Image (cartoon, rainbow, N blue to C red):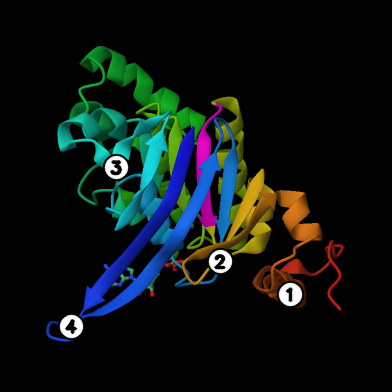
Amino acid sequence: MIELANITKYYTRGFFRKQKSLIVDDVSLSIRRGETLGLVGESGSGKTTLGRIALRLIEPSSGTVRFDGVDVTSLSRSALRQFRQRMQIIFQDPDTSLNPRMTIHDCVAEPFRIWRLAGAREMEDRIPELLGLVGLQPELASRYPFEISGGQKQRVALARVLALNPTFIVADEPTAALDLSVQAQVLSLLKDIQQKRQLTLLFISHDLQVIEKMSDRIAVMHKGRIVEQGATSQILRHPTDRYTIRMIAAAHESEAWFGKESPVTTE
Ligand SMILES: Nc1ncnc2c1ncn2[C@@H]1O[C@H](COP(=O)(O)OP(=O)(O)O)[C@@H](O)[C@H]1O
Ligand SMILES: [Mg+2]
């Protein structure tokens, strides 16, 4: 249902002697409805750029993005608006999406107003429902973002996104800023909601363990290219690309993987 075909993105630097830097290099991938594709790679490999191109928050230099068969890269701004509601993003830092001067109630009410989704009565019913869905007590609604924890803020950001009933979500390192224990809870919640609502999810992380937990399939990104993609167990147990093999070996050496059985042998 989401298809990226031959996506390329470069930025040019300099004025007289123009230098091109290639950030995304001829990337093709597709994500089926209700599937989670984990996009993994080291910092600077182009993951965020690719994720934003998938939502057309950044224009690609070339290539196409199809959403349910419709080429969104060639849509006009007004035609795109119709798709925007169904394609949402969760950022690493929840403060990016929460206005510090709004209560949690108003933060969750905001998408209803912007998109004119519901009447006032219906909205007042849906806000506690959405807070419950992301595991937050209704009493929290009267607080401000600075009065709640990072994990709770990320749950509010998720509630805002879910208010729009999206079918495709890009989650860009959504738990990278959270403590490990909180990270696990938010990941479980996201996975649970993804499965219940059959959401199509592009899940971005530099952390292989997180990617393993979340993904049906994995695409490995290195220097702007997808060097390998396949089913999660396939990639983790039988990687064929040199970079993937190195990345998995490094993850096993790090303490984060301590206590876990090694699924791959590297000679
Ligand atoms: N607007 C921009 N102009 C120039 N270079 C950029 C821009 N945005 C990102 N880059 C560069 O693109 C590369 C990939 O960035 P990014 O997509 O954020 O990678 P990742 O999310 O994997 O860390 C980085 O080297 C970054 O400096
Ligand atoms: Mg990034």
**What residue sits 26% from the left and 21% below the top?**
117
Point out residue 178 in the picture as x, y percentages from the top left corner: 51, 60
Q: Is mark 2 within 8 Å of ligand 1?
A: yes
Point out residue 62 in the picture as x, y percentages from the top left corner: 32, 55
Q: Is residue 261 left or right of residue 109?
A: right
Give neighbour class at mark 1: few <14, some 14-19, many 20+ (Cα, 10 Å): few
Q: Is residue 125 left or right of residue 46?
A: left
Mark 1 or 3, nearer chain start: 3
* Circle 1 residue: 255
User: Start and end of the magenta stretch?
Assistant: 198-204
User: Regarding ligand 1, which quadrant of the image does it lie in?
Assistant: bottom left
Choose between 109 and 16: the one closer to the eye: 16
In front of the other: label 3 or label 2? 3
* Circle 2 residue: 41
* Circle 4 residue: 14
Are circles 2 and 4 on residues that touch, CB within 8 Å? Answer: no
| Disc 1 to disc 4, C-alpha distance | 43 Å
| Disc 3 to disc 2, C-alpha distance | 25 Å
Choose between 179 and 188: the one closer to the eye: 188
Q: Quadrant of the C terminus?
A: bottom right
In front of the other: label 1 or label 3? 3
Are circles 2 and 1 on residues that touch, CB within 8 Å? Answer: no
Amino acid type at image mark 2: Gly
Q: Is residue 74 above or below residue 28?
A: above
**What residue sits 54% from the left and 39% below the top?**
31
